[in-house]
């Protein structure tokens, strides 16, 4: 699956994120691509859109992506949370993810 990641890197990039690993799902009907934050990039608050330090990670979520050669494609990502004091609030917020 290394070639699939190479194709994705050449034609579709998410700023601040990298494609980490690609694999077929257990039923071989879809492709799951693990996505992680790029090393050295700062998390961006989903409310105020200001960068801030990562706090912890939420459980891995699955996001539907563009189908590829007749296979459903899902991006797998564990979102980071950042402290709410980035935007002067006390609660934890999840980061902005690419759309």
Image: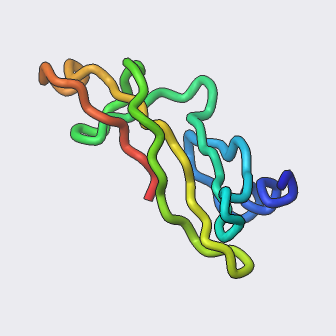
Horizontal arrangement in the rendering, residue 42 relative to residue 30 (left or right): left
Q: Residue 75 appears at what percent x and percent y?
A: 56, 54
Q: Which image quadrant for residue 87?
A: top left
In the foreground, 18 or 30: 30
Q: Residue 28 appears at what percent x and percent y?
A: 71, 65
Q: Is residue 31 above or below residue 29?
A: above
Image color mode: rainbow
**Residue at the extreme right:** 3
In the foreground, 15 or 34: 34
**Residue at the extreme front:** 27
Residue pictured at 56% horizontal, 35% vertical? 37
**Residue at the extreme bottom:** 70
Horizontal arrangement in the rendering, residue 92 relative to residue 97 (left or right): left
Q: Residue 92 appears at what percent x and percent y?
A: 23, 25
Q: Is residue 7 above or below residue 20?
A: below
Horizontal arrangement in the rendering, residue 74 relative to residue 31 (left or right): left
Q: Which image quadrant for residue 39?
A: top right
Residue pictured at 47% horizontal, 57% vertical? 63
Residue pictured at 70% horizontal, 41% vertical? 20
Q: Which image quadrant for residue 29?
A: bottom right
Image quadrant containing the C terminus: bottom left
Horizontal arrangement in the rendering, residue 3 relative to residue 90 (left or right): right
Q: Is residue 67 above or below residue 30?
A: below
Image quadrant containing the N terminus: bottom right
Residue pictured at 72% horizontal, 58% vertical? 24
């Amino acid at each position: 699956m290394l070639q699939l990641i190479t194709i994705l890197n050449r034609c579709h990039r998410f700023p601040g994120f990298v494609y980490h690993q690609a694999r077929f799902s257990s039923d071989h009907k879809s492709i799951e691509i693990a996505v992680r934050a790029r090393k050295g990039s700062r998390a961006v608050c989903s409310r105020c859109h200001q960068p801030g330090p990562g706090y912890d990670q939420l459980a891995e979520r699955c996001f539907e992506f563009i189908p590829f050669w007749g296979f459903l494609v899902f991006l797998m990502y564990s979102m980071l949370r950042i402290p709410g004091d980035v935007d002067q609030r006390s609660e934890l917020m999840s980061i902005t993810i690419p759309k």
